[in-house]
Image: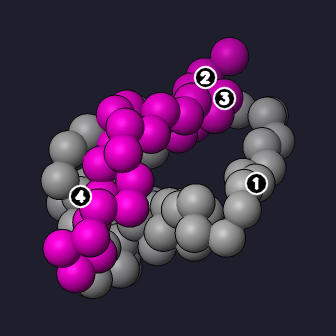
């Protein structure tokens, strides 16, 4: 099965505050995943990072969408590729 989204050792900060610390996730074509956790655990941050929102800085790791590193792409470029 093809991997659609692969997140490797993702670290992210917002306004100098580290939120995501070493997140790993792999989603293959046809799979359905749910992101769950208590308030403040990084669910919304992950969504914002995947969307490429400006205030969210990736400090380590990578996000591969259809085998392409999208970490440096603008929100518009991610959208054009079908990310959101």
Q: Secondary structure at mark 2?
A: loop
Residue 9 horizontal side relative to residue 15, left or right: right
What residue is pinned by disc 2?
Answer: 2
What residue is pinned by disc 1?
Answer: 36
Could you tell me which residue is drawn at 67 percent across and 70 percent down? Answer: 39
Quadrant where the image shows the N terminus:
top right
Residue 28 horizontal side relative to residue 18, left or right: right
Residue 19 vs 3, above or below: the answer is below
Q: Residues within 10 Å of mark 3 (few under 14, many from 20)?
A: some
Q: Earlier in the sequence, mark 4 or mark 3?
A: 3
Q: Nearer the viewer, residue 48 or 12?
A: 12
Could you tell me which residue is drawn at 57 percent across and 69 percent down? Answer: 40
Q: Nearer the viewer, mark 1 or mark 4?
A: 1
Mark 3 and mark 1: span between their CA atoms?
A: 19 Å
What residue is pinned by disc 4?
Answer: 58
Mark 4 and mark 3: span between their CA atoms?
A: 23 Å
Q: Kindly indicate the quadrant of the structure image that contains residue 38.
A: bottom right
Q: Earlier in the sequence, mark 1 or mark 4?
A: 1
Q: Examine the rendering and report whether any part of residue 66 can be seen.
A: no
């Amino acid at each position: 099965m093809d991997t659609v989204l692969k997140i490797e050792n993702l670290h992210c900060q917002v306004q100098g505050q580290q939120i995501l610390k070493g997140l790993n996730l792999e989603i293959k074509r046809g799979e359905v995943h749910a992101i769950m956790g208590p308030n403040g655990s990084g669910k919304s941050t992950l969504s914002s990072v995947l969307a490429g929102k400006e205030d969210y800085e990736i400090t380590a790791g990578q996000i591969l969408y259809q085998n392409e590193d999208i970490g440096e792409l603008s929100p518009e470029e991610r959208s054009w590729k079908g990310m959101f």
